[in-house]
Each structure stands twice: as C-alpha cells, then as structure tokens.
Amino acid sequence: MLYFSYIILSCHLRLVVDFDGTCTEHDTTPLLPRLAASFATRQRSSIAPESEDIHKQDLERRLLQFKQLEDEYMRLLGDTKTTLFSNDTEEGEKEKSMHEVLHALDNPSTIVTKMVSESRVLEGLGHASSDELGDLIAVDHDIDVGDNKVVVRLRQGCDHTLARILLDNDEDKSKRDASCLGWSLAVLSINWCPNLIDAALIQPVLKKRRSILQIDACETEIPVWSNQVDGDGVVLLHVPGALAKRDRIVELRQHIQQRNESPESLIVYVGDSSTDLAALLEADIGIIMGQSKSTSVIAERWGVKIIPLDQRNQHGFDRRLGGFINKKSEKKILWQVDNWHEIDTLLIELDEHWS
C-alpha cells in the first residue's frame, strides 16, 4: 500500500473517496476482530491442526472485547456531543471554529483506538496480506448461504463508477475506451486496515475495469491513505481524524502546485460523515453520500450549505468552481447524493467539460 504518495496522481482530474459508509453500505470496523480471529486460525492451522473450539473461543474473546470498546466509544462520543451541542452551551459554542469542534469529536475515537491497541484484540491482522484477506471476505452477495466468509457490501454502482473513470498510468487517452474517463483515484480513510480496503474495494474495482475494457491486466495504481494496524494489533494513526483528512487534501493540492502543473486541475472528494467535513470543504467539489445528521448540524451551524446534487443547475453550479456559488463568494456549498449513480453522472459532465 502507498501512504501519502502523490506521484501517481498525474492527471488533472482527481477523485478522492472515503471508504466506510461512502463506498461501503456499512462501517467495516466491526468486521476487523472477526477477520483477525479467522486469519489467526488459518496461521495456526498451517503449523498444526486445531479444534473448532479453539477458534470459537478466540473469536468470542475478540468480539466481546471489541463490543466493550465500541460501547466505550459510543459513551464518550455521546458525552462529547452533549457538551458541544447542548442548548445551554450553544452561544459559547458559536465562538469556537468548526475545526475545533471537529477535533473535539475526533477525541473519543483517538482515546478508544489507543485502548484497541492495548487490548491486542486485532493481534495478527497486520500480518494478513491483501490476497489473504481477499480469501476471507466476500464482496456484496458473492457467497452462498452458509459460507464462512465475512461479507463486505459495496454501495450499488460504486465499483462500476470507480472502474470506469480511471486513467491507467501509461494509458494514451486518445486510445482509451470511450466508456472510461480519465481520472486519478485515491482512497482516504480512517479505517485501520489498508489491506482490507485493497481487498474489498480496489481489487473489485480493478476487476470491474478489466471487464469493462475486456483486458487481462491494467497498470492502474490506486493509493490508499489510511491508518494501519501492525502484527501486534497496534493501530498506527496516520489519519487520526477530520483535520488529518483535510491536511491530506491540502498536501495533494500543494503537490499539484510543486509539480508546476496547469492551474486547470480539479479535486473532488466524496465522504459521508462529520469526519469528512473538513476535507469536503477543502476540495474543489465536496460530495456527501447519504444523510448524516451530525454533518448537517455542524454545517448549518457554521453557514455551510448542503444542496442535493441533482439541484446543482438551479444553484449556479460551475463545472470549473464546483463548490462555490461564484468566484468571490465565501460561502461554501457541499453537494449531497443518495447513490453512486448521481456521482457517476456528475463525473461524466466534468470529464466532458475538462477534456
């Protein structure tokens, strides 16, 4: 996996996407202890056969520990939201910046992530390669009832859209299939397991791309910018929260400028939660997947408009400026969608306009 490497993002159209809740239907974090237990069983079995009871006990221990940690996270998050958004503190809260609030909302995750590391509930997971995790999971509905694999469901149309827009590193745009656009793609996530992102999203996208182009292989690379769990189950916080996500978009923009690329470049970011809000605002076009109440509350309180993407033409959407009503406006607009079909339609429009 590539962490914070921008060199392959050579195209002037860049799409950066969150993983959990944006590309997937549900958060995959609760799947990690189950995957860690399954991988540990496979590793032990490669040395000596073990009974089903040993695996069951290990799995139950990990799941129980993780559930307790989840409960602690929800408690801390609830307390933080109460402190930040209670009526009696609303006036004082307005004096804080949006970034201060987002940072405060990230604190419960940072605290509990440290507890996850100390518990070793994910021990062994960091040793699992993308291919090994691919053997343990099934994406969408590709399994029979009774199959032992862990299911990761992508949002409908996500893999097709991402596969179709990609530009191969060495691909001549004039020769590429008319159904494929010319975007660079990266995944920006607070997920702890980049190899899971690769197995559950990137490999299915590349498989779909090969199917679209009817080719055996392609040279496309998709960097993953995320947290990481090591072999001991310790989580390395490369992207601890909302402000770190924003910083990755800032660094990407700086990389573009340092390469002396044409100013005619565009960064689109797609996310689904308050953790994505700062990055959504930093991008040229920020797209919110779904209906996040917490994101809407924060955006409204700090004067950020959230408009359904299908109403963009009624709100002065500019395919060059994307999120702004006009060049001089200080009010940022974020665009809301309910499915990847809407994003697909927008990316086609942008690609045609920027070609």
Image (cartoon, grey):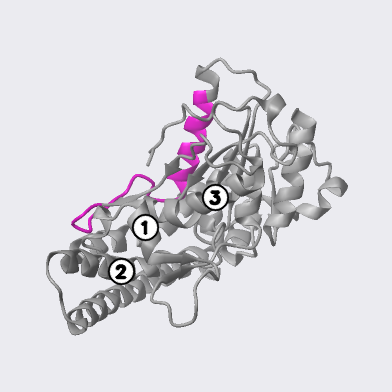
Taking 207 as reference, is 3 left or right? left
N-terminal-most mark, 1 or 3: 1
Q: Which mark is residue 207?
A: 3
Q: Is residue 231 inside the magenta stretch? A: yes
Closer to viewer: mark 2 or mark 3: 3
Q: Is 60 placed above or below 99 here?
A: below
Q: Nearer the viewer, residue 220 or 250?
A: 220
User: Residue flagged by tag 3: what amino acid is it?
Assistant: Lys
Which residue bears the numbered disc 2? 33
**Residue 327 seen in the figure:** no
Q: Position of residue 89 (x, y in %)?
A: 51, 64
Determine the image quadrant of residue 44: bottom left
Instruction: Check disc 2 and report its element: helix, strand or loop.
Output: helix
Asked if marks 2 and 3 touch (Cβ < 8 Å), the reply is no
Quarter occupied by the N terminus: top left
Q: How many angstroms separate mark 1 from mark 3 (CA)? A: 38 Å
Taking 313 as reference, is 124 left or right? left
Which residue bears the numbered disc 1? 107
Asked if marks 1 and 3 touch (Cβ < 8 Å), the reply is no
N-terminal-most mark, 2 or 3: 2
User: Residue flagged by tag 2: what amino acid is it?
Assistant: Pro
Determine the image quadrant of residue 113: bottom left
Residue shown at 41% from the left, 65% from the top: 137
Q: How many angstroms separate mark 2 from mark 3 (CA)? A: 27 Å
Q: What segment carries the magenta color?
A: 230-255
Closer to viewer: mark 2 or mark 1: 2
